[in-house]
Amino acid sequence: MRRDAVQDPAPRTPPSLSRPRRLTPPYPDTRNDGLQSIQQAESRHQARPIPEVACDRCGKTDIQHDLHYHCNKCSDGNFDLCLRCYRTGQGCNHWFGFGYVARARWDKHAPPGGYPPEYETPHVLTARRYVRRSPERGTTETGLQEGAFCEGCFKHADQSYWHCNACFEGAWGYCLACVQQEKHCTHPLAPVTRVPDQQRVRDIPGIGRLLPLPHLPTNDYYSYLPTTTCAVSRAIIPPDQTRLHCSQCNNGNYDICNDSYNSLMATGKISNANGLSGWRLCLQGHPMSVVVFRNVLDNVHQRVVVSDVVGGWKAKDKSLQASTQTQHDIPSSLRAVALWSWWPADGVEDELAFPKHAELEEVEEINTDYYAGVYASSRGLFPANHVRMS
C-alpha cells in the first residue's frame, strides 16, 4: 500500500494500488482557510503550565497544541493519542471502536450471563487541545479545550456542534461555520450545544432535549433549534419551511425565504435563468442550496440539504455568471459510499480524506485503482476499492 496511508483496522487490507501522479488540472484546496469560528465558548480548566503530551501509540511528541484524544483511565489517566492514531483505530487499552460500534461490539463479546457489575464499560476518549497564549501576554499558562471539535477545521465546537449520525459510526460532526459554508457531509446534521450547568437549560432559547452522543464522554449535550432570519425581508423563517442558503455571502450566514425569492424573480432582480428553474443564484451571483429543518424526534431537529447547488462542486468553487443554461443541461453526478475510511499520509495534498460511511459525490474514474470525488466541499483522489458505487 502506498505511502503508509491507512484504513479501518477491522476489514482486510485492500489490494495494492496504481496511483496517478496527480489530478490534472490540480484542484484548489477547499479546506478551512482560517475564517474565525462563529462559536467562541471554550471549556477551560484552571490555568496551569502547558504540559508536554506525546502519543502513546506512535510516539509523536509535542501534540499538546494539536487536537488529540485522551483517556483518563488508562495509564493512570495519562494515555493520549494523536489525531492520526485515533482515526486509524488505535484506541486505548479498553477501547472497542468508534461511535455506536463500541457498545455493540462490547455486548457481542459478553460472556454467558453478561458482564459482572464491576466490569468496565468501553472507554470513550476525550478530544482535547491546549490553547496557546499570545506571547505578548508574557505567560506560559494556557487553557484546555475539551469536548466536541469540528472534523473539518478542528475548532472547538461545544457551543454549536452539528452531529452526523452516519459518518464514522456516529463519531462525527462539524462547527457552525463549516455547516454554514457547506464544508460538511451530505447526511442530515443535528445541532447540539453543551450545557454543563443543568440549572441553565430552561433559560436557553430554542433548547431541546438531552441528546447523548456516542463519542462524547460527558452527558451534557442538548439539542437546540437555531433561529433563521431571511436576509431580504428580515422575517423569521419557520424551521419546517425550505429556504435558499448561500454559503458565500456573510461567511455563509445568509438565507432567503421562498416568498422573498419569488418576489425577487417577479421584480426582475433575479432572472428566470438564474432563478428557481435555473442556476438558483443569490443577489450577488452565488449558487444557493435548498435547506430545511426536520423534526426527527421530540425536540430534536436535523438540518437537511434538500437540493445542493446547481453545478455541484465546481459551482461552489467558482461563482456562476449569468447564463441561459438551465439545471436540466447538467448531467447527474455519480456517487459512492465509503466502505472504509481513507486518511492520506501526512504531506499528501491531492488525496481526499473521508470517514467510513461517507457519501462521495461527483465521482470520476481516474484509472482502475483510483477515483476522484468530492467530500465536504473538498475534491481529491481516493482508492476505488474503498467505496461502493451507489
Image (spheres, grey):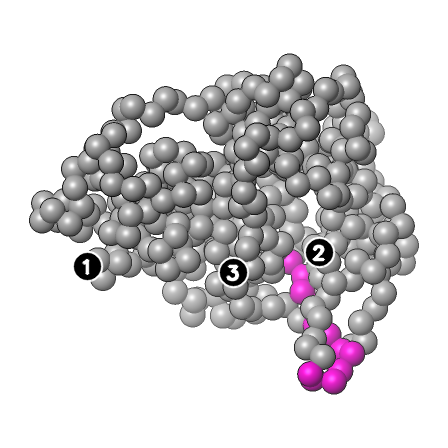
Element under disc 3 = loop
Task: Tell me: 319 left or right of 326.
Answer: right
For marks 3 and 2, the one nearer the N-term is 3
Q: Position of residue 114 (x, y in %)?
A: 78, 33
Task: Tell me: 64 left or right of 269.
Answer: right
Q: Position of residue 218 (x, y in %)?
A: 65, 57
Kind of residue at disc 3 = Leu
Tell me the crowding category of disc 3: few under 14, some 14 to 19, or many 20 or more residues within 10 angstroms, Cα based. few
Quarter of image, res 349: top right
Q: Residue at x 44, y 42 (%)?
A: 317
For marks 1 and 2, the one nearer the N-term is 2
Residue hosting label 1: 233
Q: Position of residue 154 (x, y in %)?
A: 62, 54
User: In the rendered structure, which segment of residues is drawn in magenta?
Assistant: 136-149
- Judged from this view, the residue extending furthest toward the top is 368
Q: Quadrant of the N terminus?
A: top right
Q: In the displayed structure, would residue 81 be above or below residue 312?
A: below
> How far is the residue under mark 1 from the one under mark 2?
41 Å
> How far is the residue under mark 3 from the one under mark 2?
18 Å
Residue hosting label 3: 35
* Magenta-span inclusion, residue 141: yes
Kind of residue at disc 1 = Ser
Kind of residue at disc 2 = Leu
Residue hosting label 2: 67
Element under disc 1 = loop
Of residue 244 and residue 236, the one placed in the foreground of this image is 244
Residue 240 in sight from this viewpoint: no
